[in-house]
Image (cartoon, coloured by chain):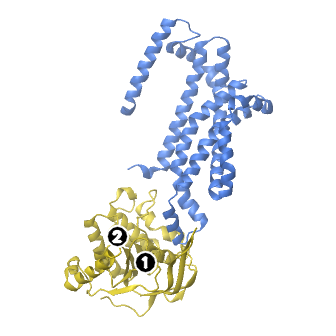
Chain colours: A yellow, B blue
Amino acid sequence: MREQNKKIALRFQNVNFYYKNGAGKIPILKNMNLSVADGEFVSIIGASGSGKSTIFRLIVGLEELNSGTIYLNEDPVTNRSGKVGYMPQQDLLMPWRTVQQNAALPLELQKENHLDRRTVQNLLEAFGLKGYENKYPHELSGGMRQRVSFLRATLSGSNVLLLDEPFSALDAMTRLYMQEWLLEQWEQQQSTILFITHDISEALFLSDRIFVITDTPFTTLKEIKIPLERPRRQYDLDKEEVTELKNDLLDQFRMRV
Amino acid sequence: MKNYLYSIILITIFLLIWEAGAGFVATSFILPAPTEIVIKLWELKTELLLHHLPMTLAVIIIGLGISLVLGVALAISMNLSKTLQQAIYPILIASQTIPIIALAPIFVLWFGYSIWSKVIVTIIITFFPITVSTFDGFRSTSKELKELFQTLGASKRQIFFKLEVPSALPSFFSGLKVAVPMSVIGAAIGEWLGAQAGLGYFSRRMMTQFNGAGVFAPIVLLSLIGILLFITVVLLEKYILKWRRS
């Protein structure tokens, strides 16, 4: 496992959140606590509608907490927009911008962004996008578009990256390659990644820990440590302790179907 | 050029049938032959091109220009405020149900035979497609992209210029492409109802003189203006939306 600092990159303290609708309040988070260490790779899995995405929307500031505190790098933050890198489910690249212009969007929008154009160039190269800088999104494959989207999240300059089912639209083969690619990037960049997925194998392959949402509203998330060394390869998933974990998880979700 | 081959063939066939039909009817003020119209156009070239065409072109350009500013401004204000949208949208629709031809004499009363009575008619006809399509363009802005901008800490101004405007552009151009041929119609109607010069005015004057070829000659020019303006917009669109070329 990668060396982790003692620092906490992200922490939820007694966070309450509910959606309002015509009938009243729908509670999602109840006194929720969670913490993610700097440099950690954590996945969140749960059924659709269980509130996975709500956790992300709270972190990026698209939803306001009803009470509690969210800490980023050990500082409590109230205005969270622009503080973390976010990679959405669809790649959400703008069709009128080239690869380079899409990726560099955070630099244009954030005054305090400390990255410069040279970083963009270097990262484009590191992400295997050299030669594609001036192509438009529709000229790229699905995997490449996701790499541009991940690059954009990285260029937000934050050490915390939130990835919301980024590979769910890719075909199975591309998805496997992208998972390995993502781990390489994460190891090089030393970033902290929170990863939402439906896919149990994906979560097992990528994560240090998995948070499982079993019930909504939730107070704590069930935590599972993955007994695998890094660097990992896809065939590591065939190890006995991992297949057992996988079957346990499958059973848990099966009961809820 | 090959793309136009079939339309050229079709138009040629149409003109040949017309020519034959005109020969058969043999009453020039009811159905002048295409060749007669071409000859008339040549005879009148100085008067039409130097005197009447500039008048009509001025109406079209000024009318379209004001429509553009007005239409885009309306679309932006409706996009900014839900209240404005609810206030403006029904009036916008209502404005299109007004029979312009019935109203035009009033514009003549207000503005006389000056250029403005025709410009007003042109504006009323053309601002609608520009406003509606630009507004629809703004509304087509992806909600997810907007949220992504927010997570990056974008200001309202940045969201407008970097996201909403580019999102609205394709739709804006569609509206403009509808408005351009309509501006020619608007100018011609305006001139019919009261003018002292212009291609529409000239065509009507020829009508009172039972000069069939004289009616059609300025119409050919009007149609050419429409086509040229349309091509200009298409070229502009191709240049600005170059990302759409694959």
Q: A202 and A113: which one is in front?
A: A202
Q: Disc 1 marks which amino acid? A: Leu
CB within 8 Å, label 1 to label 2 = no
Q: Residue at x 55, y 72 (%)?
A: B153
- State the separation of the CA atoms marked 1 and 2: 20 Å
Res B171 label? none
Q: Is residue A68 above or below residue B115?
A: below
Type of amino acid under label 2: Glu
Q: Which residue is mark 2?
A: A125
Question: How many labels, in total?
Answer: 2
Which of pointers 1 and 2 indicates the residue nearer the eye? 1
Disc 1 chain ID:
A
Q: Residue at x 54, y 15 (%)?
A: B37
Host chain of mark 2: A
Q: Is B110 drawn above or below residue A209 in the view shown?
A: above
Residue A70: x, y in percent? 52, 84
Instruction: Let me know if residue B227 appears in the view.
Output: yes
Q: At 37% across and 66% down in the image, what residue appears?
A: A146
Tell me which numbered mark, 1 or 2, is placed earlier along the sequence. 2
Q: Answer yes or no: is residue A118 visible.
A: no
**B239, A28: nearer the viewer:** A28
Under circle 1, the secondary element is strand
Q: Is B72 situated left or right of A182 in this image?
A: right
Residue B51: horizontal and vertical position, in percent? 66, 24
Report the front residue among A162 and B160.
Answer: A162
Q: Are marks 1 and 2 on the same chain?
A: yes
Q: Nearer the viewer, residue A21 or A246?
A: A21
How packed mark 1 is, by other alpha carbons closer than 10 Å (few <14, some 14-19, many 20 or more), is many
Question: Where residue A199 appears, x then y in whole percent?
Answer: 32, 73
- Read off the residue under disc 1: A161
